[in-house]
Image (cartoon, rainbow, N blue to C red):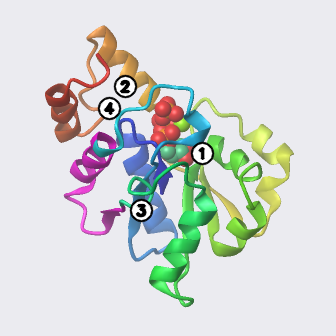
Amino acid sequence: MGGTFDPVHYGHLVTAEEAYWQYDLDEVLFVPTGQPWMKRDMDVSPAEDRYLMTVIATSSNPHFRVSRLEIDREGPTYTVETLRALREEFGEEAEFFFITGADAILEIFHWKDPDEALSLAHFIAATRPGYDLARFEADGASHHPRVSVMNIPALAISSTDVRERVAKGRPIRYLVPEGVKAYIEKAGLYR
Ligand code: ATP
Ligand code: MG
């Protein structure tokens, strides 16, 4: 599961756990982005903070792991490069599922080498509140044999909202794990 994770929240964790269960996965690997090229004009927190928050949020789950693959890489990383690196590491027999929100999946077809990405992994698009699935259906991306839609219990949580809440002094308890909330306060993020 790739993401900016700025910060990681319960929407991400519920999505990952549901994919783990619905697709009978061995584990879920969270891959925080390095300097994300699609968000390069926006302020993104340091990769190390985003990585640590993701480690904290996933530490109690034995089948969740966090990868430094993208954050340790210089310059922008393309998902297809990450998938290639994982293929190298895990070998030909491994089967990969790339977990995304339905809002993010449309971007896949505008990625670098979408065909190669689709040959390297199966793509799971999780439903997300506020996102119109009709747009996704209309795109044709949803009809690709390597793309499937996964229904998850609706969680209208976004990192953007969490950041805005911190900036305004509004509560974020129960939107992010306690440890992530503590880390945000300790590091002084989003103020
Ligand atoms: P931002 O508001 O900064 O864009 P975000 O909440 O969308 O943050 P990302 O790090 O961009 O979080 O998301 C990583 C992945 O998780 C994306 O594929 C996104 O669609 C998915 N995702 C995020 N929040 C949810 C949610 N509440 N339900 C389902 N999927 C989600
Ligand atoms: Mg997003």
Residue 95 x/y as whole percent: 55, 80
Pair 1/2: label in front: 2
Pointers 2 and 4 in contact (C-beta within 8 Å): yes
User: CB of residue at label 1: within 8 Å of ligand 1?
Assistant: yes
Closer to the chain start, of discs 3 and 1, is 3
Residue 69 is tagged as 3
Within 10 Å of the Cα at label 3, are there few (<14), some (14-19), or many (20+) other Cα atoms? Answer: some
* Residue 72, x across and y down, in percent: 38, 57
Left or right: 126 in relation to 117: left
* Label 1: element kind: loop
- Marks 4 and 3: in contact by CB < 8 Å? no
Q: What residue type is labelled 4?
A: Leu
Kindly report the distance in space between the C-alpha atoms of the residues bearing marks 3 and 2.
Answer: 25 Å
The residue positioned 26% from the left and 11% from the top of the image is 169
Residue closer to the observer: 6 or 11: 6
Q: Is mark 2 on a helix, strand or loop?
A: helix
Give the mark nearer the N terminus: 2 vs 4.
Answer: 2
Image mark for residue 162: 2
Disc 3 and disc 2 in contact, CB within 8 angstroms: no
> Could you say which quadrant of the image residue 29 lies in?
bottom left
Q: Looking at the rendering, which quadrant does residue 162 occupy? A: top left
Residue assigned mark 4: 175
- Please give the name of the residue rendered at 60% of the width and 56% of the height, measured from the top-left corner: 78
**What is the magenta range?**
49-67
Q: Which residue lies furthest to the top in this view?
A: 168
| Label 3 or label 2, whichever comes before in sequence order | 3
The nearer-to-camera label among 2 and 4 is 2
Q: Which amino acid does label 3 sit on?
A: Leu
Q: Residue 127 carries which label?
A: 1
State which tag comes first along the sequence, 1 or 4.
1
Residue at image location 36% in from the left, 59% down from the top? 68
Residue 45 percent across, percent down from the top left = 37, 32
